[in-house]
Image (cartoon, grey):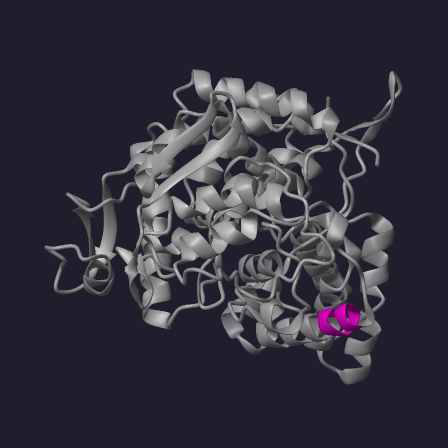
Amino acid sequence: MPGQSGVRRLSRVELDTALSDLLGDTSNSAQGLLPPEPVNPFDNDYRAQFASAALIESVERLATDAANRALANATLRAALVPCSPKGPGDASCMRTMVQTVGRRVFRRPLTGEEVDRFMALQTFAVEDNNFDTGVRLVLQAMLQHPAFLYRVELGTPLAERPGTFKLSNYEMATRLSFFLWGSTPPDWLLDDAANDKLADAAGIRAAVDQLLADPRAKRRLERFHALWLAYAKLPHPAALTNALQAESAALVDKVLFTDRGDYFELFRSSETYVNSTLAAHYGMLGAPASGSAWLPYGPLPRMGLLSQGAVLSAGAKFSDTSPTQRGIFVRTRLLCQDIAPPPSNANVDEPPTSPSSNCKVDRYSAHASTGNCKSCHQSLDPIGFGLENFDREGKYRAHDDNEPNCPISGDGKITGLPGGELPFRGAVGLANLLTASPEFEQCVVTQLYRFNMGRKEDPADLAFISALTEGFRSQRREFQTLLKDFVSHPTFAYRVEE
């Protein structure tokens, strides 16, 4: 069954990427001007988007600045105005510009009425005796238009299924491009839409192959993993942050694009991509004097993404790691389980204490054994304690910070899955446990679904997610195949009215 689809505003990152592709504008000004979006874990949940006066004012400034920058650059201006105006009132040249740029900005051809409304702005060019005055105003208006700022899907209603709509070819092109590039469709994809090449699964899969061959697809899928696994932003010094994020991005690229093997190698890899700073951070030998290189972990207790410092940075609290927060991370991000918020009378701003010991395991055990917090902590803390050998920067440690008399065992367990109480030790044990779990496999697909649809799944979406998961499993978990199965599935070409 097709999923519900609402009007989705472009995220700040999507706006910046679209402005870069449309106008060559690499200022990333949307991230500096527009209010930040809620991130949970993705930044494109349309059900959490609300308009405000601050947003409207920021968009106006964004559009004005972007138009000015584009026309101040002779090369960029030439790409926007594909003709030589004979004067400020050259309506033919202005109309060509409006139609050409409008198709790119609105991701579809403009209607005749829309063209006429933009053409009316040429009167200001005549008054100013400057053709570019009209171009500037057209750009400013287009970049503030809902057809640019929002992904509006109308489609054609199905008589046999009230409330269900078949997307147009241009709406399909937009879905594909924002899913795989996080940006507006390129001209060749809009041409495919115009020529009806996106009307069947074969044409869609061919377009996906071309989209995935572009570096923008790598950046988009790197961002999906960074948002999902909470390392898009890290609270570390710049050098360490850059090294950690580059390490994780390199592994994502290797598994998804270079090797194109089992997706779970992302969590089982016995080597990692480090520079000298990160090698020293992990205690690895053989680091390159300059640049980065792939090095084996060897005897170190590390394997795959879950042992990388970028991912292990999640769950920090009280200037240290929090077993509770790490347990929440595993249950919500990796198993797609919902965790209830703490009771209103729970004090979550003070670290747990114990009357008899300062060791973290004893302090958390005392906290989890009493009161309203007992059941939740008993399902969360044991997971986090399995990762306690890694500090909030991902460095290995044998005992609690500043507490040499508090050794860390690294023993953890997960409850509530088939098989009962499942013990593990460290990041390696957790990775092995999860990659053997059908629940983790389905959560990978579920998180991809949420990222694409801009919302959490509804009960009606579960059959589609399960079908994708079964295909993922049966095709050796090759991620690019999953992407193509996702977008070429019949339900992808439809929307259900909210």
Residue 491 or 116: which is nearer the viewer?
Answer: 491
The boundaries of the magenta stretch are 54-59
Can you tell which quarter of the image residue 91 is in?
bottom right
Q: Left or right: 396 with respect to 151?
A: left
Can you tell which quarter of the image residue 304 is in?
top left
The residue depicted at 33 percent of the width and 47 percent of the height is 307
Residue 281 or 88: which is nearer the viewer?
Answer: 281
Q: Left or right: 230 with respect to 279?
A: right
Picture quarter with the N terminus? top right
Q: Note whether 479 is above or below 320 in the view shown.
A: above
The residue depicted at 40 percent of the width and 25 percent of the height is 436
Q: Note whether 378 is above or below 64 in the view shown.
A: above
Can you tell which quarter of the image residue 309 is in?
bottom left
The percent coordinates of residue 267 (x first, y second) are 35, 37
Residue 352: in sight, yes or no?
yes
Q: Is residue 30 magenta?
A: no
The residue depicted at 52 percent of the width and 26 percent of the height is 417
Residue 409 or 295: which is nearer the viewer?
Answer: 409
The percent coordinates of residue 346 (x first, y second) are 67, 58
The residue sitting at the bottom extreme is 128
Q: Note whether 396 is above or below 472 in the view shown.
A: below
Q: Main secondary structure of the magenta part?
A: helix
The percent coordinates of residue 482 (x first, y second) are 49, 27
The residue depicted at 79 percent of the width and 58 percent of the height is 50
